[in-house]
Image (cartoon, helix red, strand yellow):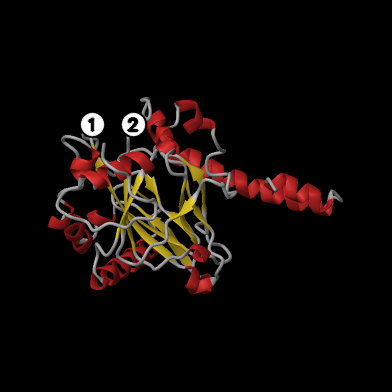
Amino acid sequence: MTHVLPIDTKFTLGETLTEEQRAFLDHYGFLHFRGVATRAEVEMLRAEQDRLEQRWLSEGIKQINGIPLFFGKGLGGKPAIQRIPFTSRFSERIQAFVRDARFRGLPAIVGEGARLGDVEKDGVVLNRYVNVPGSVYQRLGWHTDGLRDLFYLRMPQQMLNFGVHLDDITRDNGGLRLIPGTHKQGFLSMLLGKMHFISHGEDRREICVETEAGDLTIHDGRLWHRVARSQREGAESMRRTMFVPYLTGPYEPKTEASKTPGYHTLGKVMRNARTLMALLALAAVFLGAGYAGYAALLGG
């Protein structure tokens, strides 16, 4: 039996996973690789994110291949797109990066016949979290990615998230939180263990994944995970990430005629529900329920 390394172990990406790395992923449900992208590549990816954001804003694009863009406020209160799907389809530089030889061993981690799914699901996604008024991505509530499979009328399967991190993030600046080992939980726990996207509270089992720009993380989508709000504000709270999908199963490319998947519709409902709860809480204060009523409506 392969020895499992301590949970705070950081790895170096090679052509294939080592036995120690596979044992770590199986036990904890994630891996953390240092310095996979160079500083120059990080700057390139940031610049391409800015370029695509300005293009879609100027052209008034609301969705790409059925996947909605997430609009909010950025620095200085300016309009911003905080989640952009299918970025590699509109950027030769991003496409070249995700197809680089250093990543050739990653599909094998997912399973036999796995492929880069840059024209499937949501494609290569760029996210931008920032803690400013009007941002729709200040944080992201607890969730598992198993719900996505349910909308495709199948039981949750192993799904690995490959994230390239474009900023230096420490605990006080929010960032990714995982509950190690929960990728092995039962179906009901995966579905009902927390209120998907609405619950944001700290969990005594969670860990913070502190990253440097250029790091790569891999985590099992069946893990409970969230993104915490930064304790900083403005530019210092910026957290940018790129997620690259590797898929197995039927090839299901998206086109301009593709409909918006149910899980995105549900996500919008969940985000609106959170806003509604906040408005109801404010109403409770004005109606005399006081702080206790306000806290109760927000979940503590």
Whole-percent x and y of residue 158? Answer: 32, 35
Reading the image, the residue beneath label 1 is: 249
Q: Residues within 10 Å of mark 2 (few under 14, many from 20)?
A: some
Disc 1 or 2, which lies upstream in sequence? 2
Q: Is residue 206 visible?
A: yes
Q: Is residue 75 visible?
A: no
Location of residue 160 by image quarter? top left
| Residue under the point 24% across and 39% down | 110
Depth check, front residue: 263 or 105: 105
118 vs 262: above or below: below
Whole-percent x and y of residue 137? Answer: 49, 57
Q: Is residue 38 left or right of residue 206?
A: left
Q: Is residue 300 left or right of residue 45?
A: right
| Numbered disc total | 2
Reading the image, the residue beneath label 2 is: 157
Q: Amino acid at mark 2?
A: Gln
Q: Amino acid at mark 1?
A: Gly
| Residue under the point 34% across and 52% down | 85
* Gap in angstroms between the C-alphas marked 1 and 2: 11 Å
Depth check, front residue: 14 or 238: 14
Q: Quick check: marks 1 and 2 in contact, CB under 8 Å? A: yes
Whole-percent x and y of residue 258? Answer: 32, 39
Location of residue 183 by image quarter? top left
103 vs 75: above or below: above
Whole-percent x and y of residue 154? Answer: 36, 25
